[in-house]
Image (cartoon, rainbow, N blue to C red):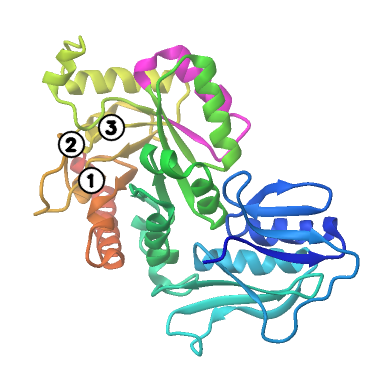
Amino acid sequence: MLHHVSLAVRDLAVAGAFYDAAMGALGYRRVFQDQTAIGYGIEDGKDKFCLKLRSNPVAPGPGFHLAFDAPSRESIHTFHAKALAAGGTDNGAPGPRPNYGQHYYAAFVIDPDGHHVEAVANGPVGLVGHATNASPGNRQVIVALDFESAAQAFRLVEQLGAAAYSYKVGLQLLTAQGPSVVRQLVTAGKQVFLDLKLFEIPNSVAGAVAAAGQLGVGMVTVHASGGTAVLRAAVDAARPFPQLKVLALTVITSMREQELREVGVSSSVREQVLRLAKLAVAAGCHGVVASPQEAGLLRAALPGDALIVTPGTQLPGEAPTDQARTATPAEAIRAGSTHLVIGRSISRSPDPVQSFLAICDQIGQAVAQRAHDPAALS
């Protein structure tokens, strides 16, 4: 297969401004540049697409165009709008192209040097703004992208399309693929829950939180066990980024009393979760991460605007996992959770879209029940 593609341009600054906007919408960035060339890609020094300054460039003739894979249909709309704003010419608005395939969705532009450029997504999802956004549960579900590669992650993102808004990027995917995955999700208009579980000295935690804010992340996690100084450092580092919420991780969902005693904690899980949650709120954190079994306890003890994010939910009938303190999504919402981190129930489903929408419907019903029956909090 191709290693990279190069285009000749007459003005590197003009072409660079155009492709910064257009390629940025698809999750790519400058990874190489000198006085005569600019390379775009994901990893530094590994350009897949390059602009090269030439004195009298000639665009290829009819039939030649470059088609770039887009992470989502939303990103195709962003690509088209930003390309036109940066000096491109419209050559086909975003939309389905059934003559190219049943699920082919694309937009076409012409760059300032006359090259024909396309952004395309090819997957069975609803159109941008489709009515599948209707359920209130859509924004409360954070889909966990616990994959080994970006390709696997974005296959699920494309399948879920406009229906899903929030995604978790954890240590596995971040270590394997780097921050480019986060950039692509943010560019596609998704909220990213960056589950770093930071447990370091205050200065290091502050630096990591600031880096998360610069990526455009919406939520980042810090271990509450780090203490007040660590938590305050995280909160202070997040202040320049209004969208960034700092969440304090209390007790991971695989732990029971026995594991707490192994690390010198004599309190029960519920006592330790509540102690750390109160510490986090006092330090200025926007919310906490705890299992669904503590959601009711926390909802009653914490301020009304505190976020309670709960991993560890399972659908009825699902095989047990390494999560020790679990509940169903509906039970977690009725107990007081504001957001649910759900991975395998969606990503390993034979039909991830239907599973996601079914969970959202269950959440919507649970929200309505909780609103009409405050005693549902447990």
Magenta residue span: 224-247
Depth check, front residue: 211 or 355 = 211
- Cα separation between marks 2 and 3: 15 Å
Q: Position of residue 285 (x, y in %)?
A: 45, 26
Crowding at label 1, few (<14), some or many (≥20) Cα neighbours within 10 Å? many
Q: Nearer the viewer, residue 43 or 156?
A: 43
For the point 19% across and 23% down, the residue is: 270
Closer mark to the observer between disc 1 and disc 3: 3
Q: Are marks 2 and 1 in contact (CB under 8 Å)?
A: yes
Residue type, label 2: Ser
The amino acid type, in three-letter code, at marker 3 is Ala
Q: Is residue 252 left or right of residue 126?
A: left
Mark 1 touches mark 3? (CB < 8 Å)? no
Magenta segment includes 177 = no
For disc 3, the marked residue is 290
- The quarter of the picture where residue 78 lies is bottom right
Which of disc 3 and disc 1 is earlier in sequence? 3
Q: Secondary structure at mark 1?
A: helix
Query: Which residue position is annotated with label 2?
Result: 378
| Closer to the camera in the image, 360 or 78 | 78
Is 371 placed left or right of 233 in the picture?
left
Q: How far across and down, in percent of the image, does residue 284 sit? A: 48, 23
The residue tagged with tag 3: helix, strand or loop? loop
